[in-house]
Image (cartoon, rainbow, N blue to C red):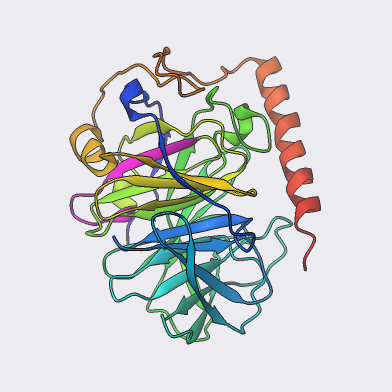
């Protein structure tokens, strides 16, 4: 068993050349609450937040829907998506804004629409989780969404059983510093630290976590996700996304990001995998891309400090976040 690891991220952003580049926009009205994204080199797989049945839309690289993979299972609140090497799509039914669920779930959806349910239980009470990481052995990791404090990392304590429940164990924690990158439905000071999605590249050697405004790239040379999340990552700003929750690696080494909203763009950070491998875990300092994507480098953003005033503001913002999402998702 891996011991719990906590790491405070004091990372610098990449040079302005790492600004996200728009690939296309999703104009199909069926994909208006994009929350999960995956890729296989030929297609992108998109999943909405919530819903009354399991649905994954297969997009071409012009963002047009080619078909939908569906199953009649009614989830509670699906939040993230990962794709295994065999084509199985894993949907994280782990949303819990009110922190009242006794179990959460993973749905393994195959390309023909057959689904297997795996229920899970936390060792320390309910958590709201929007990030799923699937390692190269198909072991799932869940990363909690915390308005303050550490984002907690969990994985199954044993082999998944269907329908379960299978107990989870805590294997790590990640603390993010707030930034000034604009975007998201709440203030950047809080929105920049809320983990809203995750991804692992095809060979399992690079891990990404995202918030509403940032992506963090972690090197995982041995495929160990828990160990990767204890390393110092590379921070890549994802400015001006309305409600950025989707992230995925494509097979060309780029990192894709997407946001909820109508006519939402899919953007790419070119060469993200190589950036993580070459710079992850180092003490490299580099200028940040401009928040508006203009290419003008800015000094690295720091956390808000430890003054009583700053902490009070952070606390009020956090309460606002909880209220916002509790109203937004009233499904029980």
Depth order, front residue of 310/180? 180
Residue shown at the point (48%, 18%) measured from the top left: 302
Query: Quarter of the image containing the C terminus?
Result: bottom right
Query: Quarter of the image containing the N terminus?
Result: bottom left
Depth order, front residue of 270/198? 270
Q: Which residues are magenta?
A: 214-225
Q: Position of residue 301 (x, y in %)?
A: 47, 18
Task: Classify residue 70 as left or right of residue 50.
Answer: left
Q: Position of residue 15 (x, y in %)?
A: 32, 22
Compared to residue 148, the image places residue 203 above or below, namely: below
Q: Position of residue 134 (x, y in %)?
A: 37, 63
Q: Magenta segment: does it hold 47?
A: no
Q: Quadrant of residue 17?
A: top left
Q: Quadrant of residue 250?
A: bottom left
Task: Classify residue 223 as left or right of residue 45.
Answer: left
Total residue callouts: 0
Can residue 302 be seen in this snapshot? Answer: yes
Depth order, front residue of 39/317? 39
Residue shown at the point (47%, 87%) measured from the top left: 114
Task: Classify residue 43 as left or right of residue 54.
Answer: left
Q: Position of residue 6 (x, y in %)?
A: 41, 41
Residue shown at the point (51%, 44%) measured from the top left: 265
Can residue 133 be seen in this snapshot? Answer: no
């Amino acid at each position: 068993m891996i011991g719990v690891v906590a790491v405070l991220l004091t990372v610098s952003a990449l040079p302005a050349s790492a600004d996200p580049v728009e690939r296309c926009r999703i104009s199909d009205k069926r994909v208006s609450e994009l929350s999960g994204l995956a890729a296989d080199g030929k297609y992108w797989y998109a999943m909405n937040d919530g819903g009354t049945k399991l649905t994954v839309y297969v997009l071409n690289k012009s963002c047009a829907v080619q078909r939908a993979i569906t199953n009649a299972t009614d989830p509670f609140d699906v939040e993230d998506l990962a794709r295994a090497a065999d084509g199985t799509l894993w949907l994280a039914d782990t949303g819990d804004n009110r922190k009242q669920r006794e179990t959460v779930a993973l749905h393994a959806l195959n390309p023909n629409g057959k689904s297997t349910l795996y229920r899970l239980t936390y060792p320390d009470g309910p958590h709201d989780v929007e990030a799923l990481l699937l390692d190269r052995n198909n072991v799932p990791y869940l990363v909690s969404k915390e308005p303050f404090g550490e984002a907690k990392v969990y994985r199954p304590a044993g082999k998944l059983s269907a329908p379960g429940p299978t107990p989870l164990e805590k294997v790590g924690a990640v603390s993010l510093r707030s930034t000034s990158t604009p975007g998201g439905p709440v203030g950047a000071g809080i929105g920049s630290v809320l983990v809203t999605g995750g991804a692992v590249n095809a060979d399992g050697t690079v891990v990404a976590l995202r918030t509403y405004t940032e992506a963090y790239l972690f090197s995982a040379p041995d495929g160990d996700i828990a160990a990767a999340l204890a390393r110092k990552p590379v921070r890549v700003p994802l400015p001006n996304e309305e409600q950025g929750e989707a992230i995925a690696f494509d097979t060309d080494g780029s990192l894709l990001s997407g946001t909820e909203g109508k006519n939402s763009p899919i953007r790419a950070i070119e060469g993200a995998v190589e950036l993580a491998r070459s710079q992850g875990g180092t003490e490299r300092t580099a200028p940040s891309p401009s928040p508006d994507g203009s290419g003008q480098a800015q000094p690295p953003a720091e956390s808000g400090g430890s003054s009583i005033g700053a902490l009070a503001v952070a606390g009020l913002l956090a309460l606002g976040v909880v209220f916002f999402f509790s109203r937004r998702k009233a499904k029980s």
